Amino acid sequence: MKTRARGQSDANMVWEHLLARPDPARGAITVQVIESFVDAIVSRQIPAGVRVPSTRAMAATLGIGRNTAIAAINSLVEQGYLVIKDRSGVFVAQFGFEAGATERRNEPRETDYDWHRRLGLELPAPRSQPLAPPSYNFRYGQFDPSTFPTSHWRQCERSALGLTQIADWGRDMVDMDDAGLIESLRRHVLPNHGIWAEANEILITLGGQEGRYLVARLLGQAGTTVGLERPGLPDMEQLIRSTAAKRVHLPVDQNGAVLSVELRQCDVIFITPGHQCPTTAVMPVERRQALLDIARRRDTIVVEDTYDTEVLSHGRMTPSLKSLDREGRVIHIGSLSKAVAPGLRTGFVVASPPVIEALRAIRRLIHRHPPGNIQRTLAMFIDRGYYHSYLRKVSGILQRRREVLSAALGELKTPARIVGSEGASTFWVEVPASVDTTALSAALESEGVLVDPGSRFFTDDAPRNYLRIAVSQIHESQIDKGVRRIDAAIRAAA
């Protein structure tokens, strides 16, 4: 008996080494046990045919309840990772991959194929990710969990998971969108932009970014001249560069895109009239109307990106270009998720029916339609009034942060030109010409301060003495200290 007990103890020690002990702070214990088993089995730390200890022994080894161990084992059996043999116990299942395949995957290749030569692509440099959570995050578009309407969102998710709802959104809709979300946009979101659209004039996208991509693919044809703001959205520049279209850069002033000679040469123009990216300039109604007059005379298509207009401008937006358009030549791109949680990746395009039909055909070749469960949950979130109540709440929070940041920037000891239009969530800061803000932002990141260098918003001969500073995530109590660090770094670099 003593020998048997010792053998069991040794076996348990082996399993304790292979399986990570669950941590309640990391979430559901059962899920953690399942993930540990799967990792160990797939990586072949536990080979096929090995007998799994009893649930009682497993519970003692991992410091969990026996019911939790039973639930984890049953789930692994159901998923096919473990098998039960009558009167013998539970064993690791045999997988279909051939013996030794895992080891061969790690063998070095004789040569590396030159994909850069074959593809001939000029890809944008990836944005750096901080190695540790920043102390002061002044980057735009960052998610702030403290403002997320968790209870309301969970309520809508639970409703969307009803059996009748799943039967509806769970099917393959081919290239169609959730009718409920389209109706929610028509009735509760687009009217805030002055837009009254029919269902066949709306397309749901995976964020505003997919809307930009689809429109760029549709309009960026050979022989077409496309106008892009300078400075402007970096991704838009990359998208048009990947097409056969010719690019022209449009100058920007304190009122947004200038009605310049360059603009009058274009077949298509992409602009951010709400809060110009990155200068935050708001295009006045008079210039918007004049722009549409030029577009009509020269047969120009106008693509309006509602960049940074949803939250801080809630309830007091300048009429959109789409709302002033009487011909259907304006394409309107927006996002539903940026204001709530960027990770939801839900946006929309509003345009004339033939444009939406063409965009839908392109989207179908990529992924058919965005996930139905997210669309249905968002529709409920909007219809129940939670979307607009959240916008009102977060608008107040971000406005207070903006006021604190404006005051802190006003105290900079370094000479700087600061631009931040009312209702924008960012400030555009010009520092002395001797300061390279790309190097500055890298140095600040090592100190836990994240900012956007301005050079990424320009092309080619980019000035390097601009910064973009945002209030998306940083708490107002951290703003003053963070700005003081930025100021000290600028003075040291000047």
Image (spheres, rainbow, N blue to C red):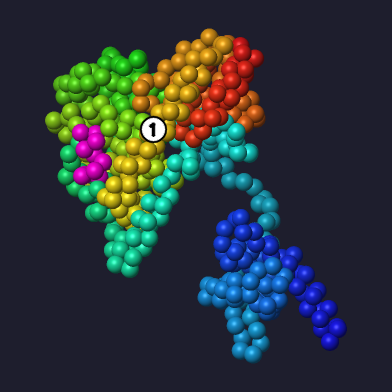
In the depicted structure, whether residue 338 falls above or below residue 19: above
Find residue 28 and report its horizontal and vertical position in percent: 56, 62
- Residue 164 visible? The answer is yes
Left or right of 354? Residue 50 is: right
Can residue 292 be found in the magenta stretch? no
Q: Amino acid at mark 1?
A: Gly
Q: Quadrant of the C terminus?
A: top right
Identify the residue position indicated by label 1 in the image. 396
Q: Which residues are magenta?
A: 185-194
Q: Is residue 392 above or below residue 22?
A: above
Q: Quadrant of residue 272?
A: top left
Instruction: Look at the image and say whether residue 192 sits in the magenta stretch.
Output: yes
Q: Quadrant of the N terminus?
A: bottom right
Q: What's the residue at 65%, 14% (across, down)?
A: 492
Position of residue 373 in the picture relative to residue 146 (left or right): left
Give the total number of marks visible in the rendering: 1
Main SS category, magenta section = helix
Q: Name the residue rendered at 42%, 33% in the picture.
A: 397
- Residue drawn at (20%, 33%), measured in percent from left and top? 194
Viewer-closest of 448 and 410:
410
Residue 60's place in the image compared with 193, above or below, is below
